[in-house]
Image (cartoon, rainbow, N blue to C red):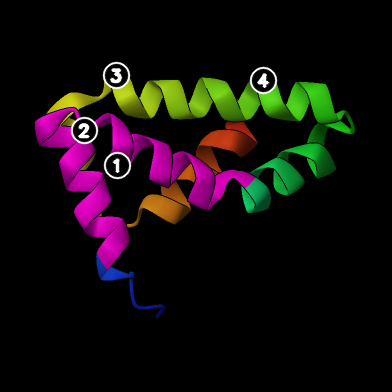
Amino acid sequence: MDRIPTDIIVLQRSVAFERDQRAYHDLFVHFYQPLIKFANNIVKSKEAAEEIYSDVLLKLWDMGPALAEIAHLKVYLFRSVKTLP
């Protein structure tokens, strides 16, 4: 099983409990490339992939403290991208 990088957990909790916009930005940038690529493979449109990614990350921001309960954020994000189109 992959070890979750501590910095991702710290960022995740900062967004969840402190509504830290810098931490949110860092998460957004960290996951951007792999998730855009993944979404683009599904929908075959870069613009649609970017819209899906934005929607998924906005929902992440809106989760508030529930975000801290997600044990595997990367898996959660990939599943969210896959289920949106």
Q: Pointers 1 and 2 in contact (CB under 8 A)?
A: yes
Asked if the magenta segment contains residue 49, the reply would be: no
Q: Which image quarter: residue 84?
A: top right
The residue tagged 3 is 62
Label 1 belongs to which residue?
Answer: 23
Q: CA distance from mark 1 to mark 3?
A: 14 Å
In the picture shown, does residue 8 fall above or below 57?
below
Identify residue for label 4: 51
Q: Quadrant of the N terminus?
A: bottom left
Find residue 33 and report its horizontal and vertical position in percent. 66, 50
Tell me the chief SS of the magenta region: helix
Q: Count of labels shown?
A: 4
Task: Give the vertical position of 82 relative to 10 (above or below).
Answer: above
Q: Give the residue type at disc 3.
A: Asp
Find numbered disc 2 in the image and state the secondary structure of the residue it sits on: loop
Query: Quick one: SS at disc 3?
Result: helix
What amino acid is at disc 1? Ala
Q: Nearer the viewer, mark 3 or mark 2?
A: 2
**Where, by quadrant of the figure, is residue 67 drawn?**
top left
- Cβ atoms at labels 1 and 3 below 8 Å apart: no
Query: Which range is magenta?
Result: 7-32
Assign a secondary structure to mark 4.
Answer: helix
- What is the number of the mark on residue 20? 2
Could you tell me how far apart the alpha carbons at marks 3 and 2 are, in whole angstroms? 12 Å
Distance from label 4 to label 3 (Cα)? 16 Å
Q: Residue at x 33, y 70 (%)?
A: 5
Of the pair 28 and 70, the residue shown nearer to us: 28
Q: Is residue 69 visible?
A: no
Up the image or down, 25 lies above or below 31; here it is above
Q: What x and y, as percent, mark residue 24?
A: 34, 36
